[in-house]
Structure formats: structure tokens, C-alpha cells
Amino acid sequence: MKTALITGVTGQDGSFLAELLLSKGYEVHGTIRRSSVDFRERISHLESMDHFHLHYADMTDSMSVMQVVGKVRPDEIYNLAAQSHVQVSFDSPEFTADVDAVGVLRILEAVRLTGLADKCRIYQASTSELYGKVEEVPQNENTPFHPYSPYAVAKLYGFWIVKEYREAYGMFCCSGILFNHESERRGETFVTRKITLAAARIAQGKQDKLYLGNLSSKRDWGYAPDYVECMWRILQHDTPDDFVIATGEQHTVREFAELAFRNVGINLRWEGEGADEKGVDRATGKVLVEVSPDFYRPTDVVNLWGDPTKARALLGWNPQKTSFAELVKIMTDSDMAKVAAERAGESVRTNLAEYLEKGIVK
Ligand code: NAP
Ligand code: G4F
């Protein structure tokens, strides 16, 4: 039985990866942060399982990282913990650098200093944001990086320090350069989930309007459970290497919104341009989507499109397992059910959803 340690197990990817590794017979350890309230919604169904264990560790605290690595002595580490929101990285650049850049170094050093360098394989959650202000379309493993946010700059350090430890110490450490991947567990402030939740709330009469930023931004969106499978495949490969993980298909935020609203029975037509663009309900003429410059970023990455050829060829991974249409349907169906349960009084609406709707949180 292999032992895996997942940092960031409470996140979208961490929760799916924990499920995958448990299904493969792994002993799974995850790290959580101390806070005054517990936020373990995504992993609560795993907590009573015999082979699932939680430990406190914070990526900004070397001692806690060292302690958990030394105690668990894992065969594989999946370093998923991060301040993962690009807009938030403009507001908290120093914290983002501490967690997303130096945090990676803390993991690598913990493995080295606890004598696990020869035994432990490490997966680093790298990102398509490294391509940023893109220098090539689509992007592959040889495309030059041009990070375009404090988040991306921090993740760039993580990418290079992993490569450095691989070459300097012969460690089996790899980066997955993952393009956007979404799910029904996606945080509510990322654009896809913000849209599907709003579409469900508008369809059920619980919200009037959705405010978005750049509707023309393009992303290569995949389904998170397919992507965590690829993280695992990267660590089972014969040699340590870096891989682009993407679907190979690109869509705009506008297209995502149009499809999400269609799934809840609302057909939108678009009127106007730029900050004046609006999504209008064809049936009623009501404006349901508006642009708010509050959601524009100081520098925005607008043309991400990945080429997954290497992962398909060397890892046998299927980038098209879940189509774009299926992804949007999974998310809208889930949010329709969630909003219906809230309306029926079966679950309580979070403050975050309320803040989002009022535009207090971006
Ligand atoms: P997520 O849902 O935001 O989860 C992030 C996780 O990191 C959470 O468990 C969070 O814990 C934890 N964390 C944050 N700060 C921490 C700290 N100081 N110490 C310890 N843990 C900390 O992100 P995700 O979408 O699952 O993404 C997983 C990883 O892949 C991240 O590194 C992200 O940057 C990267 N990535 C994501 C995508 C994507 O499209 N999803 C694409 C490329 C790369 P709390 O629950 O306590 O906040
Ligand atoms: O959903 P987003 O916030 O994701 P973003 O910035 O692409 O970052 C995500 O994917 C990265 C991989 O490329 C990860 F590394 C990162 O951790 C995270 O998971 O925004 C997507 C696009 C952006 O261009 C943004 O400007 O959507 C645009 N957008 C338009 N209106 C909006 C909104 N984004 C958000 N969050 N909220 C809006 O209202």
C-alpha cells in the first residue's frame, strides 16, 4: 500500500484526488490549516474512512511542513496548497508569494532534510497562468512563459525550483502545467462557478442579475476529476517530467455563460460592446448579465489554449473524456439542485453567495 500526502486537501482538486487515491488503495494523508471555523465541506464524506488522515500544516510555516512530511514519510506528495485566485493575488501579493512560491521550496526542503529525497515523488500544481501574456497559441511544454499576475509570478518560482531540485539532487519532482479545470466543487468566486450558481439562482427567482468582468477572455476549461487522474499518472511515469494538461479546446466567458443559462432554460442574446455589453433574456427582454469594470484585472490573461499532445502520448491520458458541454451541464445541474434545496430550507445559503451577489466579494 502506497502512502500519499496531499497539501490543500480541502480544495477542489485535493478532494477529488483524495477520492481517487483512496479508490486505488492508497493510505491518504491531507493537510488542513488552522482557523476559527472549519471549512471541510468537500472532504467531510471522507473523514470517517480508515485510510484517510488529516494533519495541521500551513505552507507559510516551515516547521509545520517539516513535521508533517517527517511524520507521514510519504511515497508521493501532491503539493496542491496555494492561494489560487488570480484577482486575490493583486490584493495580497506578499501572502501569495509566501504560499505559492516559498511554500514549494518548503516542501522540497522538508523532503530533502527528512532523508526522503530518494524515496518520495513530488507533484507540483503548476499552471497555464505561466504563459500569461501568451507568446504562442496554443501553448505547449516549449512555449515561453510570460507570467502576468502576482499569482503567476509566484507559481513561476515554484515551477523553476522544482526543476532545480530535480537536476541538482536527482529528486523525482514534476510539474503539471494545468489549464483551468472546473467542477461542481469549484470555489464560488471563479468565473465558471459564479456563472452556474447565478444562472441557477436567476432561473429560480432568487437573484436578478449577474455582473461579470471580461466576457471575451478565452480559456481551455476541463473537468477537475479528469485532471487529478493525470496528476497521478505524472507520478507513475518512468522518469520525472513536466506536462501540459488541457483539453485542446478553447471557449470565451461569454460562451460559457450562454450555455449555462441555456441549461437552466434561459436563452440569452448579447447586445452592446465592452463595458456596455449585456446578456438579455430573449423571452422576456430582461437584462440578466451586465459587465462591471470592478471585475476587470490590472493585467488579464485572455488567450489560454493548451496542447495536451505530450500527456496523451506519454501518459496515455484522454484530454477529451468530459466535453465542454458536459462540464457546463454537470455544474449547472448541481447548482440547480443546490438552490432548490436552499429554497426548500434543506440547506442554508452561505454568506459568500450573498456577498457575491451584492458585489462585495469579487
Ligand atoms: P483551491 O480550491 O483554491 O484549493 C486550494 C487549497 O490550498 C485549499 O485546500 C486551501 O486551504 C489550501 N491553502 C491555501 N493557502 C494555504 C496555506 N497557507 N497553507 C496550507 N494550505 C493552504 O484550488 P484548486 O482549484 O483545488 O487548485 C489546486 C492547485 O492547483 C492550486 O495550487 C492551484 O493554484 C493550482 N491550479 C489550479 C487550477 C484550476 O483551474 N483549478 C489550474 C492550474 C493550477 P483552505 O481550504 O484552508 O483555504
Ligand atoms: O475563473 P477565473 O478567476 O480563473 P483564472 O484567472 O483563469 O485562474 C484559474 O485558472 C488558473 C489556470 O489557468 C489557475 F492557475 C488559477 O489557480 C485559477 O484556478 O477567471 C477566468 C477568466 C479571467 O480572464 C477573468 O478576467 O474570466 C475572467 N472573468 C470575467 N468576469 C472573471 C469574471 N473572473 C472572475 N473570477 N470573476 C468574474 O466576474
Image (tube, rainbow, N blue to C red):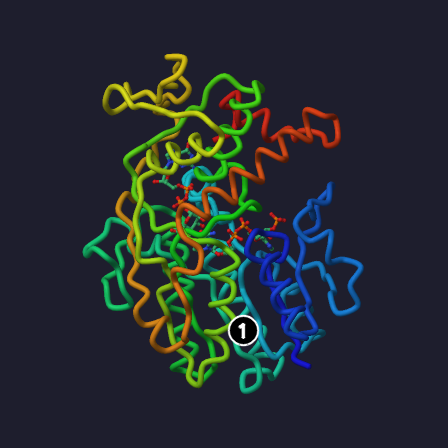
Q: How many numbered marks, from 0 up?
A: 1
Residue 190: x %, y % from top left = 47, 40
* Residue at position x 31%, y 40% in the image: 252
Residue 169: x %, y % from top left = 45, 84
The residue most toward the top is: 285
Residue 6: x %, y % from top left = 61, 65
Q: Residue 266's image quarter?
A: top left
Q: Residues within 10 Å of mark 1 (few under 14, many from 20)?
A: some
Asked if residue 304 shows in the view, the reply is: yes
Q: Which residue is mark 1?
A: 109
* Residue at position x 56%, y 51% in the image: 12
* Residue at position x 55%, y 45% in the image: 184
| Vertical position of residue 83 compared to residue 229: above or below | above
| Vertical position of residue 299 compared to residue 135: above or below | above
Quadrant the N terminus occupies: bottom right
Asked if residue 300 shows in the view, the reply is: no
| Vertical position of residue 276 compared to residue 331: above or below | above
Left or right: 151, with 8 as reference point: left
Q: Residue 284's image quarter?
A: top left
Mark 1 lies on a secondary structure that is helix
| Vertical position of residue 255 compared to residue 130: above or below | above
Q: Nearer the viewer, residue 144 or 161?
A: 144
In the image, what residue type sits under mark 1?
A: Glu
Residue 106: x %, y % from top left = 54, 66
Q: Residue 93's image quarter?
A: top left
* Residue at position x 35%, y 56% in the image: 128
Left or right: 304, with 57 as reference point: left
